[in-house]
Amino acid sequence: MTLVNPEPAGRNLPATSTDTRLTVADAERRPQRRQPVSVAYLPLALVAFITIAFAMAMWTFLAATT
């Protein structure tokens, strides 16, 4: 079985530095990465839970001391 390379002979050479530079058109064409807002919900929920739990514990402790 013979493997045949369908590409021309010069196509598999390493890229040169002039080939790898981004142009303004490349930067505009690339979509911006957007992080979803839902990623922030878990840390926000944890902070809210800890704050409310601490406030309830202090309320209970202070109510018991008076």
Image (cartoon, rainbow, N blue to C red):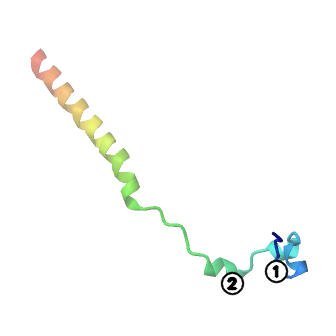
Residue 54 percent coordinates (x, y): 25, 30
Q: Earlier in the sequence, mark 2 or mark 1?
A: 1
Q: Residue at x 87, y 71 (%)?
A: 17
Q: How many numbered marks does the figure carry?
A: 2
Residue 20 percent coordinates (x, y): 80, 72
Residue behind mark 2: 25
Q: Residue at x 47, y 62 (%)?
A: 35
Amino acid type, label 1: Glu
Can you name the residue that lies furthest to the top here?
65
Check disc 2: other Cα within 10 Å, few if <14, some if 14-19, many if 20+. Answer: few
Screen quadrant of the C terminus? top left
The Cα atoms of the two marked residues, 2 and 1, are separated by 27 Å
Going by the image, does 53 lie left or right of 12?
A: left
To which quarter of the image does residue 49 belong? top left
Secondary-structure class at tag 1: loop
Please give the label number shown on residue 7: 1
> Marks 2 and 1: CB-CB under 8 Å?
no
Secondary-structure class at tag 2: helix
Mark in front: 2 vs 1: 1
Residue 60 percent coordinates (x, y): 14, 24
Can you name the residue that lies furthest to the front here?
1
Amino acid type, label 2: Ala
Identify whether 52 is placed above or below 65: below
Q: Pick whichever, 11 or 48, lies toward us.
A: 11
Check disc 1: other Cα within 10 Å, few if <14, some if 14-19, many if 20+. Answer: few
